[in-house]
Image: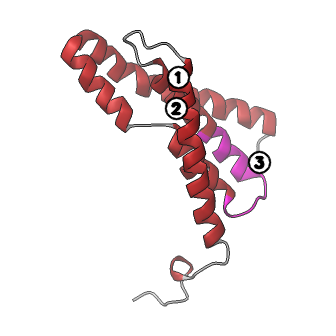
């Protein structure tokens, strides 16, 4: 049985700040995605969701590279990663949009279903690679 002093069970002084950072970050990320939805065309292809997910994946890769190389407050990574980028990106809207497209144009739905994860992974790999080069390897 793990002891109550194990790191996973300790209450850290930074925990309230982390929870606040995640909550505020999530709200900010959702507002940013909403702004993207308002700014981009709605011509049958879910441009805003695709862009939010690709940009969010790329930004998360940069955050991980940066986090590995620089000291920062404990709340920063969860606040930006889980909060801001978690609120900015969306799997639920992606899934709903695939289902809606499938009802009107199954070919377009399949294209969107495949395109989104491919571009998200590509965005993360490219952004992470650039961050490694710019920040230098450890």
Residue 110 in sight from this viewpoint: yes
Residue 56: x %, y % from top left: 56, 35
For image coordinates 27% across by 17% down, the residue present is 101
Q: Examine the rendered structure and indicate whether residue 46 appears above or below residue 53.
A: above
Residue tagged 3: 138
Residue 124 in sight from this viewpoint: no
Residue tagged 1: 38
Q: CA distance from mark 3 to mark 2?
A: 37 Å
Residue tagged 2: 34
Q: Quadrant of residue 104?
A: top left
Mark 1 crowd level (few <14, some 14–19, many ≥20, 10 Å Cα): few
Front in this rendered view, residue 118 or 100: 100
Q: The N terminus lies in which quarter of the figure?
A: bottom left
Front in this rendered view, residue 137 or 88: 88
Is 66 colored magenta in this rendering?
yes
* N-term-proximal mark, 3 vs 1: 1
Q: Are marks 1 and 2 in contact (CB under 8 Å)?
A: yes
Residue 75: x %, y % from top left: 66, 61
For image coordinates 67% across by 72% down, the residue present is 14
For the record, the magenta segment spans 60-75
Residue 4: x %, y % from top left: 50, 90
């Amino acid at each position: 049985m793990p002891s109550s002093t194990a790191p996973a069970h300790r209450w850290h002084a930074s925990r309230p700040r982390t929870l606040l950072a995640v909550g505020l970050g999530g709200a900010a990320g959702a507002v940013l995605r909403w702004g993207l939805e308002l700014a981009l065309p709605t011509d049958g292809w879910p441009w805003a969701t695709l862009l939010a997910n690709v940009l969010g994946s790329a930004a998360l890769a940069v955050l991980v590279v940066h986090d590995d190389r620089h000291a920062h407050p404990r709340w920063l990574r969860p606040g930006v990663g889980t909060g801001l980028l978690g609120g900015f990106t969306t799997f639920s809207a992606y899934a709903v949009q695939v289902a809606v497209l499938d009802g009107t144009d199954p070919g377009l739905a399949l294209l969107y279903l495949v395109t989104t994860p491919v571009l998200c992974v590509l965005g993360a790999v490219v952004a992470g690679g650039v961050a490694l080069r710019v920040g230098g390897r450890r």
